[in-house]
Image: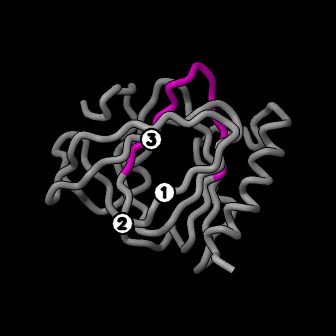
């Protein structure tokens, strides 16, 4: 069986179950909680605070996002050379499962009025992958650093650019 479809089936089931509960499955001070990491699979529980947008980044592996509470807005960026071009906006409301291709560069935001909840599942070890984060100041790719990523959260820009 196709690993992506197998994960999508399980994630869809959990997304619908968590959505039916009407509450966040995991409420922490941190927006990201690592639930599992192995060579073939990484799972995070992500809560996004309203009004914040995180910097553009890539995963370099397929990802499935199961949004079970609230909504997420993804800005998908075409890459022009080493810089990002004007993004396509995708608004996703719970319950939904969204696929991000391994070559996608995106930023994520919560355009709603309450914290959102989602399971982010990556088909590989995201914690050990050398990926990129785009600087909001220079629009240039640099090595991904989770502390810089979290510190780079800014008030939402509707176009995805500052």
* Residue 75 relative to residue 162: left or right: right
Residue 114 included in the magenta stretch of the image: yes
Q: Which residue is mark 2?
A: 131
Q: Are marks 2 and 1 in contact (CB under 8 Å)?
A: no
Around disc 2, counting alpha carbons within 10 Å, would you say few (fewer than 14), some (14 to 19), or many (20 or more)?
Answer: some
Between disc 2 and disc 1, the foreground one is: 1
Quarter containing the N terminus:
bottom right
Q: Which residue is mark 1?
A: 100
- Mark 1 or mark 3, which has the lower sequence index? 3
* Residue 1 relative to residue 104: left or right: right
* Spatial separation of the CA atoms under disc 3 and disc 2: 18 Å
Secondary element at tag 3: strand
- Work out whether residue 130 can be spotted: yes
Query: Which residue is at a point 30% across and 63% down the rendered structure image?
Result: 143
Query: Which residue is at a point 47% across and 24% down the rendered structure image?
Result: 51
* Spatial separation of the CA atoms under disc 1 and disc 3: 10 Å
* Residue 21 relative to residue 56: left or right: right
Query: Which residue is at a point 78% across and 52% down the rendered structure image?
Result: 14
- Mark 2 or mark 1, which has the lower sequence index? 1
Nearest the eye: 42 or 158 = 158
* Span colored in magenta: 106-119
Q: Is residue 132 above or below residue 114?
A: below
* Image quadrant in which you'd find residue 161: top left
Q: Which residue is mark 3?
A: 74
Q: Are marks 1 and 3 in contact (CB under 8 Å)?
A: yes
* Spatial separation of the CA atoms under disc 2 and disc 1: 15 Å
Query: Which residue is at a point 60% across and 78% down the rendered structure image?
Result: 40
Q: Is residue 116 above or below residue 13?
A: above
Around disc 1, counting alpha carbons within 10 Å, would you say few (fewer than 14), some (14 to 19), or many (20 or more)?
Answer: some
Residue 58 picture location, percent across and down: 38, 58
Nearest the eye: 10 or 40 = 10
Residue 146 picture location, percent across and down: 43, 54
């Amino acid at each position: 069986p196709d690993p992506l479809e197998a994960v999508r089936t399980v994630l869809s089931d959990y997304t619908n179950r968590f959505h039916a509960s009407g509450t966040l499955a995991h409420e922490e001070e941190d927006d990201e909680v690592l639930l599992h990491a192995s060579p073939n699979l990484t799972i995070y529980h992500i809560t996004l605070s309203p009004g914040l947008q995180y910097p553009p980044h890539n995963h370099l592996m397929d990802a499935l996002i199961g949004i079970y509470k609230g909504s997420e807005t993804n800005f998908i960026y075409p890459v022009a050379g080493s810089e990002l071009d004007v993004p396509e906006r995708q608004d996703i409301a719970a319950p939904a499962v969204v696929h991000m291709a391994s070559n996608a560069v995106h930023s994520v935001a919560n355009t709603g009025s309450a914290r959102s909840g989602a399971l982010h599942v990556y088909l590989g070890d995201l914690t050990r992958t050398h990926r990129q984060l785009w600087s909001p100041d220079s629009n240039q790719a640099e090595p991904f650093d989770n502390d810089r990523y979290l510190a780079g959260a800014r008030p939402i820009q509707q176009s995805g650019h500052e």
